Structure formats: structure tokens, C-alpha cells
Image: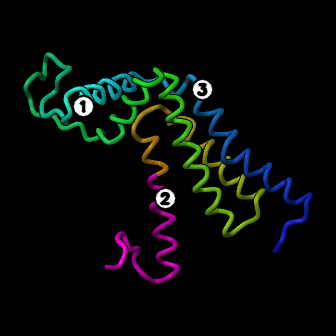
Amino acid sequence: MALQPADRVKFYLVLVIAILLVPITLGGSRTIFNDGDVSWHIATGEWILSHGTIPKTDPFSFSWADRPWVPIEWGAEVPLAAAYRMAGYSGISALATAALVALNAIVFTNALRSVRPLPSLGVVLAMDAILIPSLLARPHLFAWALLAFWTVLMIRARERDRARRWRPRS
């Protein structure tokens, strides 16, 4: 079904709002830094980048020095530290914005499979409104996009009644 020119303009306007404007507004907000753990995650990522390994003991605490420690969020802390090295807190904000753009794009395009563009925008806006209180530049922000992507893969695999293949056939 081809869109008429007027419908095409509306579609692209909704697409830009859902996937770009809302995440840029939210990711560019200073409120994403309203948590002391943001600096902790950056410092942990910096330590990992500087030492080339994941710490086995807490390098930051005098009361827990030399005690076993596993930084379970290191997979997000390294990109946070790299973004900070490149552009300071602006880099962190850009990384957070990119994660939100990815999340909104995944949810919006998946919603388009079932409903028209305007209701799909409503789904994305409702999701963003629910996420705002938890919108901090912390590892869970990146997990949201990964979880949405994984969920879409599982839905599509279920529709095909088969498991998702991770490797090409030999």
C-alpha cells in the first residue's frame, strides 16, 4: 500500500518525532546526571580501560580494599568511560541519546507492524513517559534497547515457530 504525498509527510513527521526528537530532548537533559552512581560507573570504566582488565577487588573503597568485587555492569561502564574520554559529560549525553534513539526506533518500528504511525507514536511517548523517572546515564539505560531488540527477535521467531539462529549455517 503506497502512501499518498500528504500521508507520507505525516508519516515522516511522526517518525522523526518518535525516533529522534523525543530521545534527543530526554538524552540531552541534565537530569540524566542526577545520580552519584554515574560518576562511579565512569570511574570503573576508566579503571578497566587503563588497566586492560576487570578489577577483582574494589580499587575505590578504603573500607573494602582488597576484598573481592565483581563489577557486573562493566559492559556498559567501558563505553561510558570511552564516551567520557572523548567528550566529557557531553559524550555521556550523546551515548545516552543514542541508546534512547535505538530504543525508540525498535519500539516504534515494531509497533508499526500492528498499528498506524500515530498510535505507534503514542506507544513510544507512553513508554518514554514511564521511563522518565528512571532516565539516568547508568547501565540500565543501555539494557533497555538491548531488551527491546531481544524481545522483537523472540516475537518474530515465535511468529515463524522456530528459534532464532545466531550463527550462519555451515
- Dot 3 crowding, Cα within 10 Å, few <14, some 14–19, many 20+: some
Distance from disc 2 to disc 3, alpha carbons, whole Å, reads 25 Å
N-terminal of the two: label 2 or label 3? Answer: 3
Work out whether 150 lies above or below 58.
Answer: below
Residues in magenta?
146-170
N-terminal of the two: label 1 or label 3? Answer: 3
Q: Residue 149, image x and y in percent? A: 49, 58
Helix, strand or loop at label 2? It is: helix
Question: Quick check: is 106 in the magenta stretch?
Answer: no
Using residue 18 as the reference point, say whether residue 158 is left or right of it: left
Q: Residue tagged by mark 1?
A: 48
Q: Quadrant of the N terminus?
A: bottom right
Residue 29's mark?
3
> Which residue is painted at 39% across and 23% down in the image?
85
> Which residue is painted at 34% across and 29% down in the image?
41
Residue 149's mark?
2
Residue type at tag 2: Phe
- Dot 1 crowding, Cα within 10 Å, few <14, some 14–19, many 20+: some
Using residue 147 as the reference point, say whether residue 94 is left or right of it: right
